[in-house]
Amino acid sequence: MHFDFLRNYLWNPPTRFHKKTPVSPIHSNLEVYYLFGFGYDESRDDYLVVLISTLSDNSSSYLEFFSLRDNTWKQIEGDCFPYMDASSDRILGLLFTGAIHWLAYRHDLYVDVIVAFDLMERKLLEMFGEFLSLSAIDYVNDTIELWAMKEYKVDLSWTKTLVINIDDVAYFSPIYFTKSGDIIRTNGGNVVKYNYEGQLLDHRSYSDDPDGSQVIMYTESLFSLPGGAEQV
Protein backbone atom coordinates (compact mmCIF):
# COMPACT_ATOMS: atom_id res chain seq x y z
CA MET A 1 0.00 0.00 0.00
CA HIS A 2 1.19 3.53 -0.77
CA PHE A 3 -0.07 7.05 -0.08
CA ASP A 4 0.46 9.76 -2.69
CA PHE A 5 0.58 13.07 -0.79
CA LEU A 6 0.38 15.26 -3.88
CA ARG A 7 -2.63 13.47 -5.40
CA ASN A 8 -4.21 12.73 -2.02
CA TYR A 9 -5.05 9.09 -2.66
CA LEU A 10 -4.13 5.63 -1.41
CA TRP A 11 -3.20 2.97 -3.89
CA ASN A 12 -1.99 -0.60 -4.05
CA PRO A 13 0.46 -1.10 -6.98
CA PRO A 14 0.03 -4.92 -7.33
CA THR A 15 -3.77 -4.74 -7.65
CA ARG A 16 -3.88 -1.22 -9.13
CA PHE A 17 -6.79 -0.32 -6.86
CA HIS A 18 -6.87 3.15 -5.35
CA LYS A 19 -9.04 5.25 -3.07
CA LYS A 20 -9.32 9.03 -3.12
CA THR A 21 -9.01 10.52 0.35
CA PRO A 22 -10.80 13.72 1.39
CA VAL A 23 -8.73 16.81 2.17
CA SER A 24 -8.20 17.51 5.85
CA PRO A 25 -10.86 19.96 7.13
CA ILE A 26 -8.24 21.84 9.17
CA HIS A 27 -6.17 23.08 6.25
CA SER A 28 -6.74 26.44 4.61
CA ASN A 29 -4.93 28.56 2.04
CA LEU A 30 -2.35 29.61 4.64
CA GLU A 31 1.25 28.49 4.21
CA VAL A 32 1.73 25.31 6.23
CA TYR A 33 4.71 23.05 6.94
CA TYR A 34 3.91 19.34 6.91
CA LEU A 35 5.20 16.17 8.45
CA PHE A 36 3.24 13.25 7.02
CA GLY A 37 3.33 9.49 6.90
CA PHE A 38 1.38 6.35 6.09
CA GLY A 39 1.16 3.03 7.91
CA TYR A 40 -0.91 0.00 8.89
CA ASP A 41 -2.58 -0.48 12.28
CA GLU A 42 -2.79 -4.26 12.60
CA SER A 43 -4.79 -4.08 15.84
CA ARG A 44 -7.72 -2.54 13.94
CA ASP A 45 -6.91 -3.74 10.40
CA ASP A 46 -6.80 -0.10 9.37
CA TYR A 47 -4.53 2.11 7.25
CA LEU A 48 -3.72 5.58 8.58
CA VAL A 49 -2.45 8.75 6.93
CA VAL A 50 -0.82 10.85 9.67
CA LEU A 51 -0.33 14.59 9.28
CA ILE A 52 1.41 17.12 11.54
CA SER A 53 0.97 20.66 10.27
CA THR A 54 2.37 23.97 11.53
CA LEU A 55 1.46 27.42 10.25
CA SER A 56 4.39 29.33 8.79
CA ASP A 57 4.29 31.87 11.64
CA ASN A 58 4.34 28.99 14.21
CA SER A 59 1.13 30.33 15.76
CA SER A 60 -0.76 27.03 15.53
CA SER A 61 0.04 23.36 15.01
CA TYR A 62 -2.12 20.27 14.56
CA LEU A 63 -1.86 16.50 14.74
CA GLU A 64 -4.44 14.50 12.82
CA PHE A 65 -4.86 11.20 11.02
CA PHE A 66 -7.11 9.81 8.31
CA SER A 67 -8.61 6.38 9.00
CA LEU A 68 -9.25 4.43 5.81
CA ARG A 69 -11.67 2.09 7.60
CA ASP A 70 -13.71 4.96 9.07
CA ASN A 71 -13.16 7.15 5.98
CA THR A 72 -12.69 10.24 8.11
CA TRP A 73 -10.06 12.61 9.50
CA LYS A 74 -9.63 12.71 13.28
CA GLN A 75 -7.75 15.38 15.19
CA ILE A 76 -5.69 14.50 18.25
CA GLU A 77 -6.10 17.14 20.90
CA GLY A 78 -3.01 18.52 22.60
CA ASP A 79 -1.40 21.68 23.84
CA CYS A 80 1.07 21.98 21.00
CA PHE A 81 2.86 19.93 18.36
CA PRO A 82 5.82 22.22 17.56
CA TYR A 83 7.41 20.05 14.87
CA MET A 84 8.34 20.95 11.33
CA ASP A 85 11.01 20.29 8.74
CA ALA A 86 13.57 23.04 8.29
CA SER A 87 14.53 22.22 4.70
CA SER A 88 11.18 21.92 2.86
CA ASP A 89 7.45 22.42 3.27
CA ARG A 90 6.75 18.70 3.82
CA ILE A 91 8.66 15.59 4.81
CA LEU A 92 7.73 11.90 4.64
CA GLY A 93 8.09 9.87 7.83
CA LEU A 94 9.64 6.39 7.93
CA LEU A 95 7.63 3.39 9.12
CA PHE A 96 9.39 1.15 11.65
CA THR A 97 8.01 -1.35 14.20
CA GLY A 98 4.49 -0.03 14.13
CA ALA A 99 5.34 3.68 14.26
CA ILE A 100 6.06 6.50 11.80
CA HIS A 101 9.29 8.39 12.55
CA TRP A 102 10.45 11.85 11.57
CA LEU A 103 13.69 13.75 12.07
CA ALA A 104 12.05 17.10 12.75
CA TYR A 105 12.87 20.60 13.90
CA ARG A 106 11.25 21.66 17.18
CA HIS A 107 10.79 25.37 16.65
CA ASP A 108 9.94 26.21 20.27
CA LEU A 109 13.27 24.82 21.55
CA TYR A 110 15.34 25.43 18.38
CA VAL A 111 16.62 21.84 18.27
CA ASP A 112 16.33 18.81 15.99
CA VAL A 113 14.47 15.87 17.52
CA ILE A 114 13.22 12.42 16.51
CA VAL A 115 9.46 12.05 16.92
CA ALA A 116 7.26 9.03 16.27
CA PHE A 117 3.54 8.38 15.91
CA ASP A 118 2.49 5.02 17.35
CA LEU A 119 -0.12 3.64 14.94
CA MET A 120 -1.84 1.35 17.47
CA GLU A 121 -1.73 3.70 20.45
CA ARG A 122 -2.45 6.62 18.12
CA LYS A 123 -0.27 9.07 19.99
CA LEU A 124 2.87 11.08 19.31
CA LEU A 125 6.10 10.37 21.17
CA GLU A 126 9.36 12.29 21.19
CA MET A 127 12.05 9.68 20.56
CA PHE A 128 11.09 5.99 20.56
CA GLY A 129 12.37 2.64 21.70
CA GLU A 130 14.22 0.20 19.45
CA PHE A 131 17.25 0.98 17.30
CA LEU A 132 17.63 4.41 15.72
CA SER A 133 20.12 5.59 13.11
CA LEU A 134 20.77 8.57 10.84
CA SER A 135 23.15 9.74 8.12
CA ALA A 136 25.17 12.97 7.98
CA ILE A 137 27.32 14.52 5.26
CA ASP A 138 30.79 15.75 6.21
CA TYR A 139 31.55 18.28 3.47
CA VAL A 140 35.01 19.01 4.89
CA ASN A 141 36.22 15.43 4.39
CA ASP A 142 33.81 14.57 1.53
CA THR A 143 32.33 11.63 3.39
CA ILE A 144 28.92 10.38 4.47
CA GLU A 145 28.67 9.06 8.01
CA LEU A 146 26.09 6.63 9.39
CA TRP A 147 25.40 6.93 13.12
CA ALA A 148 23.43 4.58 15.37
CA MET A 149 21.95 5.09 18.82
CA LYS A 150 23.08 1.99 20.67
CA GLU A 151 21.02 2.74 23.78
CA TYR A 152 17.63 4.42 23.59
CA LYS A 153 17.50 8.03 24.86
CA VAL A 154 21.20 8.02 25.80
CA ASP A 155 22.84 10.76 23.72
CA LEU A 156 26.35 9.49 24.48
CA SER A 157 25.46 6.13 22.90
CA TRP A 158 25.43 7.62 19.37
CA THR A 159 28.14 5.64 17.54
CA LYS A 160 29.63 6.14 14.10
CA THR A 161 29.05 2.81 12.32
CA LEU A 162 30.07 3.52 8.73
CA VAL A 163 31.88 6.16 6.65
CA ILE A 164 31.38 6.35 2.85
CA ASN A 165 33.21 8.60 0.37
CA ILE A 166 30.85 11.03 -1.31
CA ASP A 167 32.44 10.60 -4.76
CA ASP A 168 30.33 13.38 -6.29
CA VAL A 169 27.16 12.14 -4.56
CA ALA A 170 25.05 15.23 -3.88
CA TYR A 171 22.28 13.57 -1.91
CA PHE A 172 22.24 10.56 0.42
CA SER A 173 19.12 9.10 1.99
CA PRO A 174 19.07 5.51 3.32
CA ILE A 175 15.67 3.91 2.74
CA TYR A 176 16.31 0.26 3.66
CA PHE A 177 18.81 -2.05 5.35
CA THR A 178 18.77 -5.67 4.15
CA LYS A 179 19.13 -8.70 6.42
CA SER A 180 22.64 -9.22 5.05
CA GLY A 181 23.62 -5.67 6.06
CA ASP A 182 23.45 -4.01 2.62
CA ILE A 183 22.27 -0.40 2.47
CA ILE A 184 19.67 0.74 -0.10
CA ARG A 185 19.57 4.49 -0.58
CA THR A 186 18.67 7.18 -3.10
CA ASN A 187 21.03 9.44 -4.99
CA GLY A 188 19.22 11.99 -7.14
CA GLY A 189 17.28 9.88 -9.66
CA ASN A 190 19.02 6.61 -8.75
CA VAL A 191 18.53 3.83 -6.23
CA VAL A 192 21.94 2.57 -5.09
CA LYS A 193 23.02 -0.43 -3.01
CA TYR A 194 26.15 -0.54 -0.82
CA ASN A 195 27.47 -3.32 1.36
CA TYR A 196 28.18 -2.61 5.00
CA GLU A 197 31.81 -1.76 4.18
CA GLY A 198 30.67 1.08 1.93
CA GLN A 199 31.41 -0.62 -1.41
CA LEU A 200 29.03 0.09 -4.29
CA LEU A 201 27.17 -3.09 -5.34
CA ASP A 202 24.49 -1.94 -7.78
CA HIS A 203 22.46 1.05 -8.94
CA ARG A 204 19.23 1.63 -10.88
CA SER A 205 17.77 4.81 -12.38
CA TYR A 206 14.12 5.63 -11.60
CA SER A 207 13.78 9.33 -12.50
CA ASP A 208 15.00 11.82 -15.10
CA ASP A 209 14.65 14.64 -12.59
CA PRO A 210 18.18 15.65 -11.46
CA ASP A 211 16.76 16.53 -8.03
CA GLY A 212 15.16 13.09 -7.77
CA SER A 213 11.94 12.38 -5.90
CA GLN A 214 10.89 10.64 -2.72
CA VAL A 215 11.25 6.85 -2.61
CA ILE A 216 9.79 4.49 -0.03
CA MET A 217 9.74 0.75 0.62
CA TYR A 218 6.44 -1.11 0.63
CA THR A 219 5.29 -4.71 1.02
CA GLU A 220 3.13 -6.09 -1.77
CA SER A 221 -0.33 -7.27 -0.79
CA LEU A 222 -3.33 -8.59 -2.72
CA PHE A 223 -5.76 -7.63 0.04
CA SER A 224 -8.42 -5.06 -0.79
CA LEU A 225 -8.40 -1.62 0.77
CA PRO A 226 -10.87 -1.29 3.68
CA GLY A 227 -13.98 0.62 2.73
CA GLY A 228 -13.81 -0.14 -0.99
CA ALA A 229 -11.68 1.28 -3.81
CA GLU A 230 -11.57 1.95 -7.53
CA GLN A 231 -9.21 0.39 -10.06
CA VAL A 232 -6.72 2.53 -11.95
Image (cartoon, grey):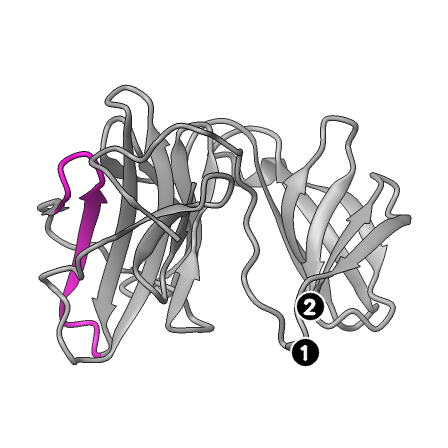
Q: In terms of secondary structure, where does tag 1 sit?
A: loop
Q: Amino acid at mark 1?
A: Pro
50 relative to 30 in the view: left or right? right
Task: Specify the quadrant of the image occupied by residue 41.
Answer: top left
Task: Specify the quadrant of the image occupied by residue 56.
Answer: bottom left
Looking at this rendering, what residue extends furthest in the front direction?
A: 231
Relative to 68, is 35 above or below?
A: below
Relative to 222, is 80 above or below?
A: below
The residue indicated by pointer 2 is 189
Q: Position of residue 203 (x, y in %)?
A: 82, 55
Q: Which mark is residue 164?
A: none
Q: Amino acid at mark 2?
A: Gly
Q: Position of residue 22 (x, y in %)?
A: 17, 57
- CB-based contact (under 8 Å), mark 1 and mark 2: yes
The magenta segment is 57-72
| Label 2 packing within 10 angstroms: few (<14), some (14-19), many (20+) | some
Numbered circles on residues, count = 2
3 relative to 189 in the view: left or right? left
Q: In terms of secondary structure, where does tag 2 sit?
A: loop
Magenta residue check for 151: no
Residue sitting nearer the eye, 200 or 69: 69
- Of the numbered discs 1 and 2, the one sitting upstream in the chain is 2
The residue indicated by pointer 1 is 210
Relative to 219, is 231 above or below?
A: below
Magenta residue check for 64: yes
Quadrant that contains the N terminus: top left
Residue sitting nearer the eye, 176 or 59: 176
Relative to 149, is 110 above or below?
A: below
